[in-house]
Image: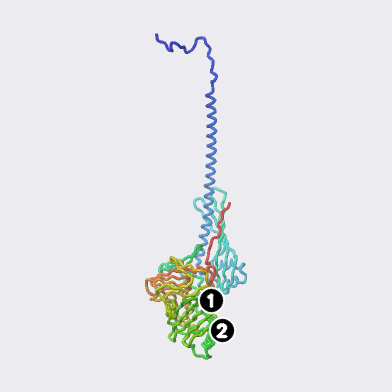
Amino acid sequence: MSCNFFPRTSPWQEGAERTPSGNAGAISLMVLFLLFVFSGLALGMISMSQLHLRINGWRKFSTLLDCASENGIKRGLEDLEDWLRSSGPVIPVSSVRVDDFRANPRAEFPLLLEDALGGGFPRVFRETADGLNWESLSACGLQSVEDRGSYFRILAGLRIDSSGAMDRLRQKRNSTLEGTLGILAGRLPLPSIPLLINKEMSPDEKAGFLRANGISVVSRDGDLLGNQLAATGQAVIPRDATATTAKALNIRMFTPQDLSPARLRAALGLEPSEDPVPDGVYLVKTDLGLGGIYVQGDADEVVLAIDGDTQVIVFRLEAGEWSLVFSPSRSQTEFRTPEGAFNYPYVPLGIIIVDGEIRSLGGGAAGDDGTVMMVTDREIPSVLSGVGLTIVSSERVTLSSHLILQGVRWQDGIPYIKESQTQLVIFSTGQDFLSQAEVEGGIAVGNDAPDELKLQASLTAGQGGFEIGGSGKTVEILGGLHATGYSGHGNSLRIAPDERLAAGDLSENAPVMAAPVLTVYSLRVMTWREHE
């Protein structure tokens, strides 16, 4: 017989009462507890996620605000750079404005900038992009001014305040940039300008001029403006060297028309006469020592050389040969002439005035027999450390060899100059010193000059401009070039400004501009701060 349960065990006993177990309901409590725990964890995770999203949202907004504020600084600085570049490195200013600044620098400084730049400070710049907007305010104030006679050296403090914001937020982020502007104003020494062409050119024309003539200008580290081609139609390159000639001849005051043959002969120590000064080389002697050198007539060759601790300058003319040998450390000078040698316990003034043409100028070396010859096959220093020379010629000057200052080395096309007062200035006026008649002036690199020519000098070419003769040449200038015109003939030119110019170490015997100008020679960033 079949049954529905195990035959030996009954699923229940009839009549027996069921009693619940002591563990009944434990599972339910455990489930409820776990449900509570996981619900709490879920709510915590939701809260943490919301907090995380909120923090990330604020972080994103904060980053965007930082970007907007930073853009305000950057775009404000770019706007300032573009404004200064568009005005040009050399900006004509009125002599009245310069005189007013001399009388009251702090009050007249904003007016001087406004007159030169066609606008003043503060300068506001606003811009919006992708829901972000920024605004910058540029302000400039006078910090210090140094009166250097014909011009002023000005240091101005620059401050750019920027605020950045978002369309959806009321919060703003602020940033501040502080820097300096270096400014020169007045009748500047021409060596303060790396490259000047006395011709009116637009920005596009200047870029095309540099490109077409293979000209490049090296910029100083940390200078945001860089070095540009200065071009102006105003006649700023002087046509006469009155002040320099007067200093060399020890004549206190005169105008070009007053330099008669009789007065020139008296200055040179010649017998009184109305006859012209004979061709030759004259060392000017004064009551206090020695003046400069005056050369009457064309010089076939002028050679600069170093011999030990002495500076040697050899003049070769049709009338004979003259040599000037002097030692600044020993305060000794020997002047060798066709008539004999003369010794002096002084050193001459470093000014050479040539009333005529210099057909060949370059560096050389002294041989074993003491003869000084021009050297073209190698680069050797030819201007003694600590010596400053200014060579002024009324007519054309032809450069035939390297002109290198002692203590300067070139590495990878970049000059490194030690702290020294060694400077060389070459100036061709294109105007006769006595008659004031226009003559053929200018400075030229000779056809036979070295292909890799190095000139560590400030070159100023009046009438006739600057020319590079021959072909396949690369001319490197440590200093500056200032000319009424330029003819490269397919050769290349590279200008590296003298780094000492940024510190204001300009030759006191350099030619100065014929009209007052203003130039912003330096724009530097000092600090950049971000704050709420």
Q: Position of residue 369 (x, y in %)?
A: 43, 81
**Colour logic:** rainbow
Residue drawn at x 58%, y 67% is 111
- Tag shown at residue 329: 1
- In the rendered image, the vertical position of residue 163 relative to residue 375, given as above or below: above
Q: Is residue 440 at least partly visible in the picture?
A: no
Q: Is residue 157 at least partly visible in the picture?
A: yes
- The quadrant of the picture occupied by the N terminus is top left
Mark 2 or 1, closer to the camera: 1
Q: Position of residue 338 (x, y in %)?
A: 46, 87
Which quarter of the figure has residue 54? top right
- In the rendered image, the vertical position of residue 453 relative to residue 345, given as above or below: above
The residue singled out by tag 2 in the image is 286
Give the structural element (helix, strand or loop) at label 1.
Answer: loop
Give the structural element (helix, strand or loop) at label 2.
Answer: strand
Query: For the residue carrying disc 2, how many other residues have a C-alpha within 10 Å: few (<14), some (14-19), or many (20+)?
Result: some
Q: Can you name the residue that lies furthest to the top here?
A: 1
Name the amino acid, label 2. Thr
